[in-house]
Image (cartoon, rainbow, N blue to C red):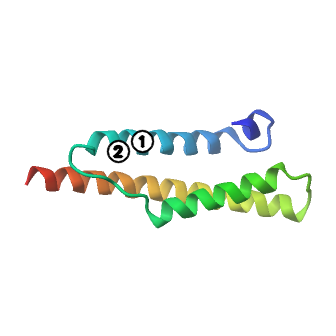
Amino acid sequence: LSLSILGVVPWWITVVILARELGVTLLRFWVVRHGVIAASQGGKLKTMLQSLAIGLYVLPFDGVLHIVAAVLMYAAVVVTVATGLDYVWRALRLRRRARE
């Protein structure tokens, strides 16, 4: 949020990341009676990419490292969306199996 408020990271990136986090949390509550959706390797990769990007953004660097931070953040957004869709798929499968 702070990086978007400061104009460093576009707001749409912050919205995508926050929406995914809220969505995954709600999905976990939705299926809690039927089982647990464990954290995936993709989710861990997402967290690592976001952390690295944020770390580079807050350091006082320009030029190449700023470009690296942007590339890492865009990669994090791609992984964020992909893992969000994976969580939806896993939640639906878990609910479907519970009905059988």
Q: Secondary structure at mark 1?
A: helix
Residue at image position (47%, 39%) is 22
- Amino acid type, label 1: Thr
Residue at image position (38%, 54%) is 87
Query: Is 83 on the left or on the right of 88, as rendered?
Result: right
Q: Is residue 63 above or below residue 57?
A: below
Across and down, in percent, residue 27 comes to 35, 43
Query: Is 64 on the left or on the right of 11, as rendered?
Result: right
Q: Which residue is mark 1?
A: 25
Residue at image position (50%, 59%) is 43
Q: Which residue is mark 2?
A: 28
Q: Residues within 10 Å of mark 2 (few under 14, many from 20)?
A: some
Across and down, in percent, residue 70 comes to 75, 57
Query: Is 20 on the left or on the right of 33, as rendered?
Result: right
Q: Secondary structure at mark 2?
A: helix
- Amino acid type, label 2: Arg
The reply to whether dot 1 and dot 2 touch (C-beta < 8 Å) is yes
Name, please, the residue furthest toward the left: 100
Residue at image position (42%, 45%) is 24
Q: Nearer the viewer, residue 87 or 81?
A: 87
C-alpha span from label 1 to label 2: 5 Å
